[in-house]
Amino acid sequence: MGSNMGFLERLRAGETLLGTFVYLNSADVVEILGEAGMDFVIIDMEHGPFSFADAEEFVRAAEVVGTTPIIRTPSSEEAYILRALECGAHGIQVPHVDDPETARRVVEAAHYYPEGMRGFSPYTRAGRYGAREPKEHVQISNREVAVIIHIESAEGVNRLPEILERGGVDVVFLGPYDLSQSLGIPGQVRSPEVTGLIEKAVAEATKRGVATGTFVETGQAAAEWAAKGIQYLAYSVDVAILYRAASEIAKNTRKEIDARKSRQA
């Protein structure tokens, strides 16, 4: 179960938060991940097969168990950002933000005036269907909605000072697989070239008071990046977690069965 503090408050307090990506089209999976202790879930609408109606149910499921629902939008288009936030997501994670102009548009789409120009309707789930006063809704949204940009190229890392110049970004997420591809070494996510880029981005973001995140596939990798200042750690993907657990169960159970048979032979 999550902390009583808000997601952004926890980051600003220096906490290291652990979550995972959600690809399976099931609110039950989101609820289970929260019960298991994940601080956040990233509802992945870039790679996952979800509609916005599905995503809204996943946000509800996350809230039930006190974990933070983040929606990864299909792209940086304003309409996708708006609809993700109207579902009640506590934050957006926007892919392929590798230049200052895209970052500016993302920040403006995610905030109401005077911080941005997000489309305004108080009658969505985010506005509690009109139960919340419009002025209060604007203030709460501008204060609490997390803006997470996904840097996926070497160019994006090199232009990070420009990207962050406007302000309004809460987390810079470094995607190791896409970074490796941009360097011409796809899949080599532990190579010095990729890890060096991530370290460079962490240093640049930290100087500006912006938190950083990345994708990890082992507890060791999570601990290493946390020691280097990364606070927002996405551990694998729900499908990979399920596959790994089921594989271990199948392998170990067959080993126990075979061992018992051999003793009885």
Image: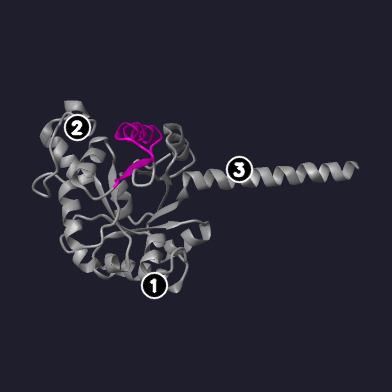
| Horizontal arrangement in the rendering, residue 167 relative to residue 173 (left or right) | left
Query: Considering the numbered disc 1 on the image, is that residue within a helix, a strand or a loop?
Result: helix
Badge 3 amino acid: Ala
- Which residue is found at the position 45% from the left and 32% from the top? 28
**Which residue lies under the disc numbered 2?**
127
Q: Could you tell me if the residues under marks 2 and 1 are in contact, i.e. CB atoms within 8 Å?
A: no
Q: Which residues are magenta?
A: 49-74
Q: Is 238 one of the magenta-colored residues?
A: no
Judge by depth and name the residue closer to the eye, 217 or 4.
217
**Which residue lies under the disc numbered 3?**
246
For disc 3, the neighbor class at 10 Å (few under 14, some 14 to 19, many from 20) is few
Q: Quadrant of the C terminus?
A: top right
Disc 2 or disc 1, which is closer to the eye?
A: 1
Location of residue 45 in the rendering, given as x and y in whole percent from the top left corner: 34, 43
Badge 2 amino acid: Gly
Query: Considering the numbered disc 2 on the image, is that residue within a helix, a strand or a loop?
Result: loop
Is residue 167 in view? Answer: no
Badge 1 amino acid: Gly
Judge by depth and name the residue closer to the eye, 44 or 146.
44
**Which residue lies under the disc numbered 1?**
196
Q: Residue furthest right?
A: 265
- Which residue is found at the position 27% from the left and 49% from the top? 75
- Which residue is found at the position 16% from the left and 27% from the top? 130
